[in-house]
Image (spheres, rainbow, N blue to C red):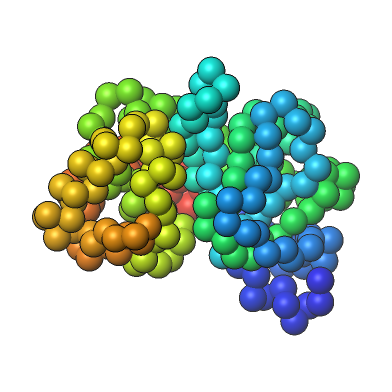
């Protein structure tokens, strides 16, 4: 990467590294454009690259009985895909696909492992992030089991907006059905309820958030819990 482009590529995990370490890391990264619905990882397959989103959004899902899938994590500019490599495991545990297209920084595993060996600050930052990712995954599973679809949809919309930085989200009912692990009729009912409250407008695969504070009120407590986990572990150490 050329130094002039480095400052434009913004990822929160990399932004807090000491300047010298950050510049070396960025010099070994390749900026890539991630395309909507592109598959970046499959369960059981060897990890070839790690990704640090700067504008894009990556969804982590797990399959049940080789058919139905459920979203268990979202990664935007606050995180990375491939954090489990820190554990010495180069096999992907989850399915990862691009939910929001845009730029990301990509590095092959060999170069990434070299960077880990050279940079203690990077090791510490990514270990904290891995803890956050594991905690949020557990929170997501509990949320799916105990909370109503409407509250979960509100939470999902808030999480997605936080990472996409846009009031308009491009998602189909089929996609939401898969992400939330419910039938399409359940998604329709929940989305209609939020629309009737004038919290969102929903048509032809586009959801526009009209009232964010209202959406936060309707959302389950897991949304605030997720934010608290990240802030408590990551931000207090910076």
Residue 1 image offset from top left, x and y in percent: 81, 71
User: Would residue 7 appear left or right of 178 to someone viewing this image?
Assistant: right
Residue 74 image offset from top left, x and y in percent: 50, 45
- Displayed quadrant of residue 6: bottom right
Q: Residue at x 79, y 53 (%)?
A: 107
Residue 78 shows in this picture: no
| Residue extending farthest top | 65
Q: Nearer the viewer, residue 126 or 215?
A: 215
Q: Nearer the viewer, residue 227 or 60?
A: 60
Q: Residue at x 68, y 64 (%)?
A: 33
| Residue extending farthest left | 197
Q: Residue at x 23, y 59 (%)?
A: 200
User: Would residue 234 appear left or right of 38 to someone viewing this image?
Assistant: left
Residue 215 image offset from top left, x and y in percent: 22, 53
Residue 31 image offset from top left, x and y in percent: 74, 65
- Displayed quadrant of residue 124: top right
Residue 166 shows in this picture: yes
Number of numbered labels in the structure image: 0
Q: Nearer the viewer, residue 176 or 222?
A: 176
| Residue extending farthest bottom | 4
- Displayed quadrant of residue 142: top left
Name the quadrant of the C terminus. Answer: bottom right
Q: Residue at x 78, y 77 (%)?
A: 3
User: Would residue 105 appear left or right of 152 to someone viewing this image?
Assistant: right
């Amino acid at each position: 990467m050329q130094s002039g482009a480095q400052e434009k590529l913004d990822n929160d995990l990399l932004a807090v590294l000491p300047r010298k370490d950050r510049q070396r890391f960025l010099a070994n990264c390749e900026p890539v454009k991630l395309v909507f619905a592109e598959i970046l990882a499959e369960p059981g397959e060897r990890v070839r690259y790690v990704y640090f989103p700067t504008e894009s959004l990556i969804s982590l899902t797990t399959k049940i009985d080789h058919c139905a899938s459920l979203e268990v994590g979202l990664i935007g500019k606050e995180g990375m895909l491939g954090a489990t490599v820190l554990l010495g495991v180069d096999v992907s545990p989850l399915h990862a696909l691009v939910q929001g297209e845009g730029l990301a920084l990509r590095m092959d595993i060999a170069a990434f492992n070299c960077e880990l060996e050279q940079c203690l600050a990077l090791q510490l930052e990514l270990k904290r992030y891995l803890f956050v990712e594991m905690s949020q995954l557990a929170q997501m599973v509990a949320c799916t089991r105990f909370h109503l679809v409407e509250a979960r949809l509100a939470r999902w919309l808030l999480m997605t907006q936080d990472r996409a930085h846009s009031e308009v989200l491009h998602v189909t009912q089929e996609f939401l059905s898969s992400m939330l692990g419910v039938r399409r009729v359940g998604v329709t009912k929940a989305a209609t309820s939020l629309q009737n409250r004038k919290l969102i407008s929903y048509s032809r695969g586009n959801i526009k958030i009209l009232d964010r504070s209202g959406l936060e009120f309707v959302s389950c407590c897991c949304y605030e819990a997720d934010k608290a986990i990240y802030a408590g572990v990551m931000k207090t150490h910076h």
